[in-house]
Amino acid sequence: MGNVTVIADDLSVCVDCLLFIANCDVSEERPGIADDIAREWPGVADGSVTLVAGGASDTDDSDGQGFSWHACDGCGSTLGGDRHVATALRNGA
């Protein structure tokens, strides 16, 4: 296995992204969530980038960031809703 580096450890993702990242769950309301994430993070499709739930340190608020109108850093959705911490990792060779 190669090196893994943190690309971003302060991502703010929507509940749909959190469920998909953590459990590969796809809600009935967002059946295209995997495609939306791959569009925002092209490396996810080829495995060079991995999104993980939670932050890179023990002090990150992984339980949630509360309600936000900001776009989701995972899928790009501009719908308001709860946001949660996620981290993007680059998978090395």
Image (cartoon, rainbow, N blue to C red):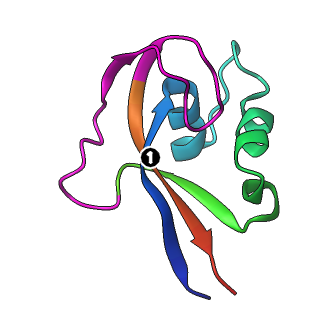
For the point 21% across and 58% down, the residue is 58
Q: Residue furthest left?
A: 59
- Please give left or right for residue 30 compared with residue 87 in the image: right
Q: Quadrant of residue 65?
A: top left
In the rendering, at what x and y percent does residue 31 appear?
Answer: 77, 23
Residue kind at label 1, given as amino acid type? Ala
Instruction: Look at the magenta stretch and give its main secondary structure.
Output: loop
Q: Is residue 23 placed above or below 52 in the rendered structure?
A: above
- Please say whether residue 2 is one of the residues in the magenta stretch: no
Res 1 seen here = no
Res 36 seen here = yes
In the rendering, at what x and y percent does residue 69 appear?
Answer: 46, 14
Q: Is residue 27 placed above or below 20 in the rendered structure?
A: above
Find disc 1 in the rendering and name its residue. Answer: 86
For the point 70% across and 87% down, the residue is 93
- Please give left or right for residue 93 compared with residue 66 in the image: right
- Please give left or right for residue 9 compared with residue 4 in the image: left
Residue range in magenta is: 56-82
For the point 51% across and 26% down, the residue is 14
For the point 61% across and 60% down, the residue is 50
- Please give left or right for residue 31 compared with residue 59 in the image: right
